[in-house]
Structures are given as C-alpha cells and as structure tokens.
Image (cartoon, rainbow, N blue to C red):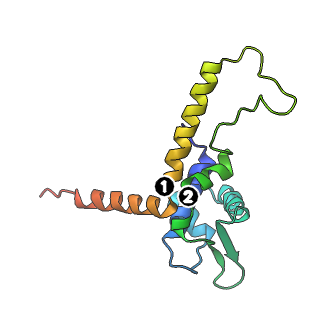
C-alpha cells in the first residue's frame, strides 16, 4: 500500500507538532524547513488537519498551529482517512437499487476487502504518540551506532 505525498506530509507534520509541549504553537515556516515540505502545500495540509479536528491555530504574536488533541488519542487510521478516504473497503457497486457490477469477480472482491481490512487494522493499532516514540527510538539507535575512526 502506498500513501500519497499529502498523507505522508500530514503524518510528518503531526509528528512534529506532537513533540511540542501541550499548548505550545509551531510555525508553518519552521515545519516546512525542518522537514523539507513545500510551504504552500503544507498550508493546505494543515488546514485539512485543522478541519478534521486534529490541529488548532492561534492568531497574533506567539500564534501558529498546535495539536488539538493529545497524541495518544489520535490514531494513524484517522490521519490517513482524512487524505485517503475510508480505510475499510466498501463494496461501492452494491447499495440500494444497485447490483453487482458486470464481470466483477467475487474472489477478487473478497481478496481486496480482506487486504483493506488488514491495512485498516494495522493503521488503527498505532497512535500519533506511538509513531513519535518509534521515530525517536530509531534516531537514538542511529546516533548510538556511529563509529569514529582515527
């Protein structure tokens, strides 16, 4: 499964925001520079995250963006669904007044539904706090594995 750049940047932006103490704002400019994300693209992403209730913003001096909820209450699946749509496969061909699409394979449909359900389960298990912890652990391991030769 591949995530769009928009989703990847949203995950990175929220991980960045989660590292700030509660109630502390961050600037779009700093986030864009430190994470290599185009500023204009990032503005659109942060607006969508704000509309989804994951970020809030403050105006004026000391203003900027901040997490609207605790990192341990934001599931990865919620973030992905904002940009990719619902995780669980829904049979889009069936519904009131619709019949199964001509030529569709029940076996392939089942396979796609199972794969979607498995992906949804994986994303649902992780919270934003888990992602930040994993990222910090990986950074710490990289730093401790550095060898210096003289």
Mark 1 Cα-neighbour bin, 10 Å: few <14, some 14–19, many ≥20: some
Instruction: Name, please, the residue furthest toward the bottom.
Output: 61
Residue 33, given in percent of the width and then of the height, sits at: 54, 63
Rendered location of residue 30, percent (x, y) = 56, 69
Left or right of 93, for residue 6: left
User: Does residue 37 appear in this view?
Assistant: no
Are circles 2 and 1 on residues that touch, CB within 8 Å? yes
Q: Give the residue furthest to the top.
A: 103
Q: Residue at x 78, y 29 (%)?
A: 94
Q: Quadrant of the C terminus?
A: bottom left
Circle 2 SS class = loop
Residue drawn where x is 85% and y is 33% of the image: 96
Which residue matches tag 1? 126
Drawn side of residue 26 relative to residue 99, left or right:
left
Please, which residue is most extreme toward the left here? 150
In the rendered image, the vertical position of residue 122 relative to residue 79, given as above or below? above
- In the picture provided, is 21 more to the left or to the right than 61? left
* Label 2 neighbour load within 10 Å: few <14, some 14-19, many 20+: some
State the residue in front, 119 or 131: 119
Corner quadrant of residue 54: bottom right
Q: Residue 121: x, y in percent?
A: 52, 45
Element type where label 1 sits in the image: loop
Q: Residue at x 60, y 29 (%)?
A: 112
In the picture as drawn, the residue positioned furthest to the front comes out as 96
Sooner in the amino-acid sequence: mark 2 or mark 1: 2
Is residue 17 depicted above or below 115 in this figure? below
Residue for badge 2: 75
Q: Quadrant of residue 10?
A: bottom right
């Amino acid at each position: 499964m591949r995530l769009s750049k928009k989703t990847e940047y949203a995950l990175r932006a929220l991980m960045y925001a989660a590292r700030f103490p509660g109630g502390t704002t961050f600037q779009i400019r700093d986030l864009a520079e430190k994470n290599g994300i185009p500023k204009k693209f990032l503005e659109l992403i942060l607006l969508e995250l704000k509309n989804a209730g994951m970020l809030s913003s403050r105006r004026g001096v000391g203003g900027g963006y901040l997490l609207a909820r605790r990192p341990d209450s934001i599931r990865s699946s919620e973030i992905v669904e904002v940009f990719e749509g619902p995780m669980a496969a829904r049979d889009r061909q069936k519904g009131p007044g619709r019949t199964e699409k001509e030529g569709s394979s029940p076996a392939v449909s089942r396979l796609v539904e199972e794969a979607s359900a498995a992906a949804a389960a994986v994303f649902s298990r992780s919270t934003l706090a888990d992602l930040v912890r994993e990222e910090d652990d990986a950074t710490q391991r990289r730093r401790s594995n550095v060898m210096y030769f003289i």
